[in-house]
Image (cartoon, coloured by chain):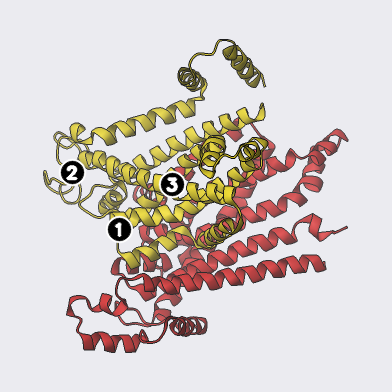
């Protein structure tokens, strides 16, 4: 309770001498970040490290992505910090490149899912009528089939390639985004300020972009985090099953699959990519958890 | 009572309709193939005559709706068609495997449901205690773990280091039940760990939601004992959400088996579908999809209906 009280006080104090809005938002974000719980800070640091590795993989790694550098299944040691894989490629190098490929593809897929689902959901809410009905019924049906099973069916038909993978998962996942975007926009479009904008004669574009969108951002941002985790895990699972990213592209799911034999000898190397997947999803979940807590708290005191 | 029956029947009708639409989608997916199944099958070696013969054999020369109804009719009779990869009857392929998959899912459910519900109720009652916070962090983490990660960790611990359980669950229809349970223990435990976290969090949330409602506060203010409030006031209303949580997770279990089966080389539907996707054996994938999707939909439908009929407001209409 005291926390909320302080934050409102802070807002009024800011209102007395307002700095430029951009600066204020940044410093607010910084303040919020400093007050964040340990788990959220941990999450943010982990995410930053992953992004760094993904961006600079070629500079950080001693070898090429699919370069054969030694014998198969070399142990950890000089030259190969994490040993080599089933074809004699450096594990560490593949791990870093895997960050790039796996995270990159999951990110693109999530963005695509948000573009499809978000636009659809907001449009359905603002337009209403038969468009809303049509979209919603299609989404209902798509959501009635388990996503992984549907993805498997579509991958059989279209074959396994990266564009197909991205499209199939993005479309299946956009249904969840659509649901959320539609539900939260429905709450906003009935507000008085939207009505006022309509009466002023603003067009559809203005209403969606300037009135509805800013107000549905917090839940959508949180959903983006959760969806990213889901997409990331789905792609990892598909790759693990041999149906996702195809060799020689380095990818965490298929790295586990390719080297799984080592596990039966008690070697944990193949688990490192799996742990990398787990760590990133945990980190994103921690941040989303904190963000949700924070945004819902702020909505309370308005 | 009549009102209740009407709602249930409406929901059932909707469920049947959804099943119908899904079957149309699964059957229609083949139409999305560039070219058709026969060209896909024969690839480079296709000549006009062989393609025409193959089309005739598979009935592709008939119109789409005709093919759909023949397919649906056969499916309902238990005839799933023939595998493209090895020409065997699909119903033969999937018979034992379906039983195995259901065995695994039920096995996991028997362990996970009581565990999750008990943990969830405890966490809700001791909200914000150390126990609740630890459980919150642990479950949030385990939701984020890929299934194969959990599976391999269990293999390393229980089968490589301790040697208690086998890492391969190679069961056959003749395997006696106790041995089946022993061999399928690690896959079942993996599934348990994956769903317990989710189920527990949902149970906790729905109970906390309930405890925040005004009538519970009223009971508190009247000075009732905590036990009385929980058993007489909260639980009757909590059953609907809890049952819902359980059934939704059972639906998830049925689908979640795919990865777990592959890790443990468990002879179930999940492994079959993955192999068939790799071989692009479309009829087998379709058949598996139908079984998975139908189970999923029927379980979700059960969740809906159970939550309708356990709703005290509908059971005792004014």
Mark in front: 3 vs 2: 3
Residue beneath disc 3:
A115
Mark 3–mark 2 distance (CA, rounded to whole Å)? 31 Å
Mark 2–mark 1 distance (CA, rounded to whole Å)? 19 Å
Q: From what the image shows, is residue A156 above or below residue A49?
A: below
Q: Secondary structure at mark 1?
A: loop
What residue sits 60% from the left and 35% below the top? B132
Residues at marks 2 and 1 touching, judged by CB atoms closer than 8 Å: no
Label 2 or label 1, whichever comes before in sequence order: 2
Q: Name the chain letter of the residue that bears numbered label 2.
A: A
Q: Colour of chain B?
A: red
The quarter holding residue B173 reads bottom left
Q: Is residue B215 visible?
A: yes
- In this view, the residue farthest toward the front is A201
For the residues tagged 3 and 2, is the chain the same? yes
Label 3 or label 1, whichever comes before in sequence order: 3
What residue sits 67% from the left and 37% below the top? A192
Residue beneath disc 1:
A242
| Local crowd size for mark 3, using a 10 Å CA cut-off: few (<14), some (14–19), many (≥20) | some
Q: Nearer the viewer, residue B199 or B213?
A: B213
Residue beneath disc 2:
A65
Q: From what the image shows, is residue B34 above or below residue B83?
A: above
In the picture, which quadrant includes the C terminus of chain B?
A: bottom right
What residue sits 18% from the left and 47% below the top? A73
Q: Position of residue B283 (x, y in %)?
A: 38, 76
Q: Colour of chain A?
A: yellow
Mark 3–mark 1 distance (CA, rounded to whole Å)? 28 Å
In the picture, which quadrant includes the N terminus of chain B?
A: bottom right
């Amino acid at each position: 309770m005291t926390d909320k009280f302080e934050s409102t006080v802070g807002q009024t104090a800011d209102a007395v001498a307002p700095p430029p809005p951009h600066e204020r938002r940044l410093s607010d974000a910084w303040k919020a970040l400093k007050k964040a719980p340990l788990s959220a800070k941990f999450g943010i640091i982990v995410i930053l490290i992953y992004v760094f590795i993904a961006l600079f993989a070629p500079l950080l790694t001693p070898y090429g992505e699919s370069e054969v550098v030694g014998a198969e299944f070399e142990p950890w040691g000089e030259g190969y910090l994490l040993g080599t894989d089933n074809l004699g490629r450096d594990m560490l190098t593949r791990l870093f490149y895997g960050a790039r490929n796996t995270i990159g593809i999951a990110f693109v897929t999530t963005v695509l899912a948000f573009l499809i689902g978000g636009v659809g959901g907001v449009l359905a809410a603002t337009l209403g009528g038969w468009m809303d009905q049509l979209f919603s019924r299609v989404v209902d049906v798509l959501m009635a089939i388990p996503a992984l099973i549907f993805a498997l069916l579509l991958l059989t038909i279209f074959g396994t390639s990266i564009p197909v993978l991205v499209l199939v998962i993005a479309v299946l996942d956009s249904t969840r985004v659509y649901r959320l975007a539609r539900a939260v926009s429905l709450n906003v479009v009935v507000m008085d300020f939207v009505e006022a904008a309509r009466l002023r004669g603003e067009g559809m574009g203005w209403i969606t972009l300037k009135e509805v969108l800013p107000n549905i951002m917090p839940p959508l941002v949180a959903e983006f985090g959760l969806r990213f985790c889901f997409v990331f895990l789905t792609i990892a699972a598909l790759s693990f099953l041999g149906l996702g990213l195809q060799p020689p592209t380095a990818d965490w799911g298929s790295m586990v699959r390719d080297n799984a034999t080592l596990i039966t000898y008690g070697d944990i190397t193949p688990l490192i990519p799996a742990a990398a997947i787990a760590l990133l999803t945990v980190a994103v979940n921690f941040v989303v958890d904190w963000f949700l807590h924070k945004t819902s708290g702020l909505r309370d005191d308005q | 009572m009549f009102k209740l029956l009407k709602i249930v029947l409406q929901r059932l009708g909707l469920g049947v309709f959804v099943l119908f639409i899904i079957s149309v989608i699964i059957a229609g997916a083949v139409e999305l193939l560039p070219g058709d199944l026969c060209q896909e099958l024969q690839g480079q070696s296709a000549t006009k005559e062989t393609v025409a013969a193959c089309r005739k054999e598979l009935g592709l020369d008939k119109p789409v709706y005709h093919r759909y109804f023949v397919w649906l009719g056969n499916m309902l009779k238990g005839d799933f068609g023939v595998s493209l990869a090895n020409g065997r009857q699909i119903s033969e392929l999937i018979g034992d495997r379906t039983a195995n998959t259901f065995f695994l899912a039920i096995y996991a459910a028997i362990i996970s449901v009581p565990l999750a519900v008990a943990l969830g109720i405890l966490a809700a009652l001791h909200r914000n205690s150390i126990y609740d916070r630890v459980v919150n962090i642990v479950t949030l983490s385990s939701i984020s773990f890929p299934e194969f990660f959990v599976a391999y960790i269990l293999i390393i611990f229980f089968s490589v280091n301790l040697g208690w359980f086998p890492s391969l669950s190679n069961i056959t229809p003749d395997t006696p039940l106790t041995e089946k349970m022993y061999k399928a223990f690690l896959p079942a435990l993996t599934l348990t760990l994956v769903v317990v976290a989710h189920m527990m969090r949902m149970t906790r949330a729905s109970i906390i939601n309930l405890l925040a409602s005004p009538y519970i506060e009223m009971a508190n203010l009247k000075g009732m004992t905590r036990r009385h409030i929980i058993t007489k006031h909260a639980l009757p209303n909590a059953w609907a959400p809890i049952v819902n949580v359980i059934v939704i997770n059972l639906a998830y279990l049925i689908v979640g088996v795919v990865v777990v089966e592959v890790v443990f080389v468990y002879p179930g539907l999940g492994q079959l579908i993955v192999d068939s996707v790799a071989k692009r054996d479309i009829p087998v994938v379709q058949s598996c999809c139908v079984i998975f999707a139908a189970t999923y939909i029927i379980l979700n439908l059960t969740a809906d209906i159970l939550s309708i009929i356990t709703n005290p407001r509908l059971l005792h209409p004014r």
